[in-house]
Image (cartoon, rainbow, N blue to C red):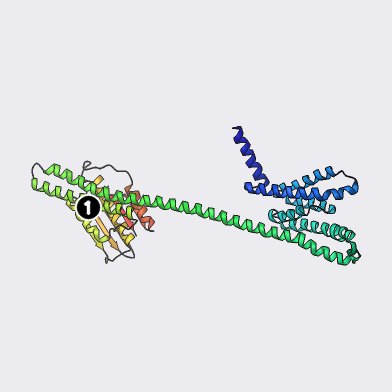
Amino acid sequence: MEAAGVAARGAELRRAMGWEHRRSLVLDAVLALLSGVEFAAELPMFAQRFGVPVWVSTVLGFLLGASLLVRRRWPVQLVLLSAATSPTSSGYLLGIVALYSLGVYCRDRRMVLGVGGIALAAALVVVFTVDLRQRGGAAAHLPLWQWTVIGLLMTVGGIVTPVLLGLYSGARRRLVAGLQERARALEAQQRLLAERARTEERARIAREMHDVVAHRVSLMVVHARAIEAVAPRDAGRAVESANLMGEIGRQALDELRQILGVLRSDGAAAAPVLADVEALVAESRAAGMDVVLEVRGEPRRMPGDVEGAAYRVVQEALTNVHKHAVGAAVHVAVAYGDGVAVTVVNACPPGAGGALLPSGGNGLRGMRERVEALGGRFAAGATEESGFRVHAAL
């Protein structure tokens, strides 16, 4: 636990000092050491003028060099420190690195210009127009204005260039960071979209499985009850019902194989069409349902997803009648106009008994989702005659 705490505090310190990686810390440590060596080599010559012992100026030099360790967090203060040490004619590495760090890590452009101007003035006045002229030897006889021009050119190279490089590097880093953040956001968005697509696909497959299994199984149950009722007195009709039940079972297996085949091959299953509604009604009639099919308008082909949704609405509505309204008369209407509308209305069932099947409560919700996903309208509810009505307009 103690080691973990030390590691956590170390990581927090690195973040506070701007060391994003360990190599950033190593780089700053190397720069601090090189700057300290430079100060230790040059500062004693300046300090001797004032009688300062060499060991004191050497220690001070390494301390000044160590200030580069904070260049990422306090670049402005570091530039001001560099300007303050300019009269000693030492610490050139400190000055260059400080100015570069100012351009990279200081976001306030006015601050960059102001601090850079201070450093420029200090270097120009103190170093080049005064100190160098005093040391110039034969060149000391040059006019002051020539020294000023020389100092200005050298200062531009030693101060303006690092600042400009720092500004470019900082802008580039921020651009890269922004692009990386945008890429992460897009990746997260893609994950969400992929998860949403998977959820929608699972819901679609669940609806398909529900429609296929519920409808076919409900018909098989109806035929099984019919066989049970007529077998003792009408063997021929019982055999006919058994054959129909077997055919319904084979149809259910075929449709399930199609759905599973889509899952394995990422292909497209053959979607049902409105022309298949007549066969759907015939199956219910064969199961003993009193069902009438009415087609209004001029039949024409619709988009595949529209016809498939309309077919599934009729299929699920008939399945619900088999489940909950055994023996009720049913009217199925398919109306063509600007689009297509299907309506399934069943009368009040003659009794409370019948082949009631368990219901998961997903049928109506699945129909609504299918229709509304295509921009259609869906309505379902009881009629005034105690029947039930399902309507979908696509």
Q: Position of residue 32 (x, y in %)?
A: 73, 48
Residue located at (26% from left, 58% from top): 333
Quick one: SS at disc 1?
helix
Residue located at (20% from left, 45% from top): 221
Inspect the image, locate mark 1, and give the three-letter code of the amino acid beneath it: Gln
Q: Residue furthest top?
A: 1
Q: Quadrant of residue 56?
A: top right
Front residue (pair 266, 250): 266
Which residue is identified by label 1?
Answer: 251
Q: Quadrant of the C terminus?
A: bottom left
Q: Position of residue 379 (x, y in %)?
A: 34, 53
Front residue (pair 172, 114): 172
Residue located at (60% from left, 55% from top): 177
In the image, 167: left or right of 267? right
> How crowded is the residue under tag 1: few (<14 C-alpha within 10 Å), some, or many (20+)?
some
Residue 116 in sight from this viewpoint: yes
Q: Position of residue 2 (x, y in %)?
A: 61, 32
Front residue (pair 218, 20): 20
